Image (cartoon, rainbow, N blue to C red):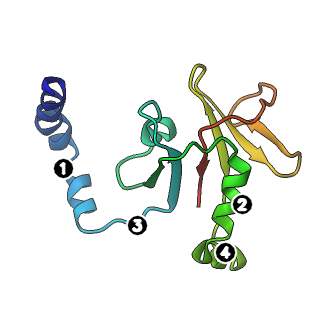
C-alpha cells in the first residue's frame, strides 16, 4: 500500500501539474475513437502498449481468458450495437495478440488467415491469448 500512496503523491506533485490542461479537458468530456478490449492482466497496459494518452482509449477488461481471438471477435459481431456499426461501415474490428516476453504485437489478417507482426518483419506466430479489438 505504501508503494501505491507514494505513486499517487508523485502523480499529484509531478505528472498532474505538468498535464493539468489535459485533465481539465478530459473532465469536460471524453470521446475516445477506440474501444480496446483486453484480458484482465496486470501485465497488459493498453496506454503503454499503444503509446496513447488518457482519454484516447476506452478500455474494457475482460475477466475470461480470450484464448481464441477469432471466436471472441465473432461473438462481439453478434452484439446488436456492434452489428449495426459494422453494417453501416462505422466500426472496424481488429484482433491482436501480445507476446509479453518480446513486446511483439500480432494482428489478424483476414486475407491470409494469419496473425502477422504489427510494425515488424518477423514471421507470423500461432494464435495466443491476450485479445484486443479496436472499434
Task: Determine the residue positioned at 20% across, 37% down.
Answer: 15
Density class for disc 4 (Cα within 10 Å; few <14, some 14-19, many ≥20) is some
Q: Earlier in the sequence, mark 4 or mark 2?
A: 2
Hey, which quadrant is residue 9 in on the image?
Answer: top left
Vertical comparison of 119 with 82: above or below: above
Nearest the viewer among 127 and 58 is 127
Which residue is label 2 attached to? 74
Which of the two marks, 1 or 4, is nearer to us in this view? 4
Which of the two marks, 1 or 2, is nearer to us in this view? 2
Which residue is label 4 attached to? 83
Task: Determine the residue positioned at 70% across, 44% down.
Answer: 68
Disc 2, SS: helix
Q: Earlier in the sequence, mark 1 or mark 3?
A: 1
- In the image, is 83 to the left or to the right of 2? right
Label count reads: 4
Which residue is label 1 attached to? 20
The quadrant in which the C terminus is found is: bottom right
Q: Earlier in the sequence, mark 2 or mark 3?
A: 3
Q: Position of residue 125 (x, y in %)?
A: 77, 29
Which residue is label 3 attached to? 31
Task: Determine the residue positioned at 53% across, 46% down.
Answer: 64
Disc 4, SS: helix
Q: Earlier in the sequence, mark 1 or mark 2?
A: 1
Q: Position of residue 74 (x, y in %)?
A: 72, 60
Disc 1, SS: helix
Q: Is residue 26 visible?
A: yes
Q: Give the spatial CA distance, label 3 vs label 4.
A: 21 Å
Evaluate if marks 2 and 3 touch, with contact meaning CB atoms under 8 Å apart.
no
Evaluate if marks 3 and 4 touch, with contact meaning CB atoms under 8 Å apart.
no
- In the image, is 116 to the left or to the right of 66? right
Which of the two marks, 4 or 2, is nearer to us in this view? 2
Looking at the image, the residue that sits furthest to the front is 64
Amino acid at each position: 500500500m505504501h508503494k501505491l500512496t507514494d505513486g499517487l503523491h508523485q502523480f499529484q506533485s509531478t505528472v498532474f501539474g505538468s498535464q493539468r490542461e489535459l485533465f481539465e479537458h478530459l473532465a469536460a468530456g471524453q470521446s475516445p475513437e477506440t474501444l480496446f478490449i483486453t484480458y484482465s492482466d496486470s501485465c497488459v497496459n493498453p496506454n503503454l502498449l499503444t503509446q496513447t494518452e488518457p482519454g484516447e482509449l476506452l478500455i474494457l477488461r475482460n475477466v475470461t481468458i480470450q484464448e481464441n481471438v477469432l471466436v471472441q471477435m465473432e461473438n462481439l459481431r453478434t452484439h446488436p450495437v456492434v452489428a449495426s456499426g459494422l453494417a453501416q461501415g462505422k466500426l472496424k474490428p481488429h484482433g491482436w495478440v501480445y507476446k509479453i516476453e518480446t513486446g511483439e504485437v500480432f494482428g489478424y489478417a483476414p486475407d491470409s488467415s494469419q496473425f502477422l507482426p504489427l510494425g515488424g518483419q518477423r514471421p507470423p506466430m500461432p494464435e495466443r491469448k491476450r485479445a484486443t479489438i479496436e472499434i
